[in-house]
Image (cartoon, rainbow, N blue to C red):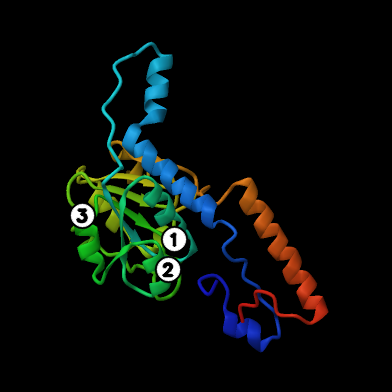
Amino acid sequence: MASYIDLNRTHERGVRVCNIVHYGDHAVAEHTFALLLELAREVGRLDREVKAGDWTGADGYALHGKTIGLVGFGGIGQAVARIANGFGMHVAVWNSHVDPMAAAGLGVDLVDDMGDLMERADIVSLHLPLLDQTAGIVTIRELDRMRPGTLFVNTARAEIIEPGALTARLLRGDVRAALDVYEREPLPADDPLRRVPGIVLTPHVAWRNDEAYVGLTRQVVESVRSFFAGGEFNVAN
């Protein structure tokens, strides 16, 4: 919220700002795994090949037993951890502002250093919000520690990564990635990310499903109702 609205200024002028929260947690978590499964099993490419008469196929990448490293463990990160547990994956989480009860309940391993997390993970998935404190927090130093063969997914915000760092890392060709968010949106036709071999790209749609739209709309309506009733539903300032 603070990345887009000057809350101090709105407070000074008596303008109420309400934040719509957690409406897309499950939608984004499911899309995270849709991207991950596309990297792991390449269903889209195989579908096109079979329809074209090609029966060659491809070997898949097993998720069971792999370690997924989560950078961010709010509502979305926790939803991703629950899905990962269902796949029989090991879940490691960067230990920054993590609810210890939630971590214990989901059986995750907490890792104090983000670079250490990226080095040990088979899959890295970003789930931090974009705040003043998180802008550019993922730097080339951390990304360089990903091992060859690591799968990288970002359904959070591109701006939490140091500008240009992810593109530089992916163009080395030893890490496969799936992205739903970008430094420039829509993604320009000449963006170098389009040249990354095997990359999977979706147009910032991770949050969009029926459940999320309903949850968002209900919170907007309740925020308006609360304002006129003298309440403080989801007030951000």
Give the residue pinned by disc 3.
146
Q: Earlier in the sequence, mark 1 or mark 2?
A: 1
User: Is 227 situated above or below 80?
Assistant: below
Residue at the location (64% across, 46% down)?
210
Task: Name the secondary structure under disc 1.
Answer: helix
Residue at the location (39% across, 29% down)?
43
Mark 1–mark 2 CB contact (< 8 Å): yes
Query: Closer to the camera, 11 or 214?
Result: 214
User: Is 22 situated above or below 125?
Assistant: below
Q: Is residue 19 visible?
A: yes
For badge 2, the amino acid type reads Ala
For badge 3, the amino acid type reads Met
User: Is 148 situated above or below 51?
Assistant: below
Q: CA distance from mark 3 to mark 1?
A: 22 Å
109 horizontally vs 84: left or right? left
Give the residue furthest to the right: 229
Q: CA distance from mark 1 to mark 2?
A: 8 Å
For badge 1, the amino acid type reads Gln
Q: CA distance from mark 2 to mark 3?
A: 26 Å
136 horizontally vs 217: left or right? left
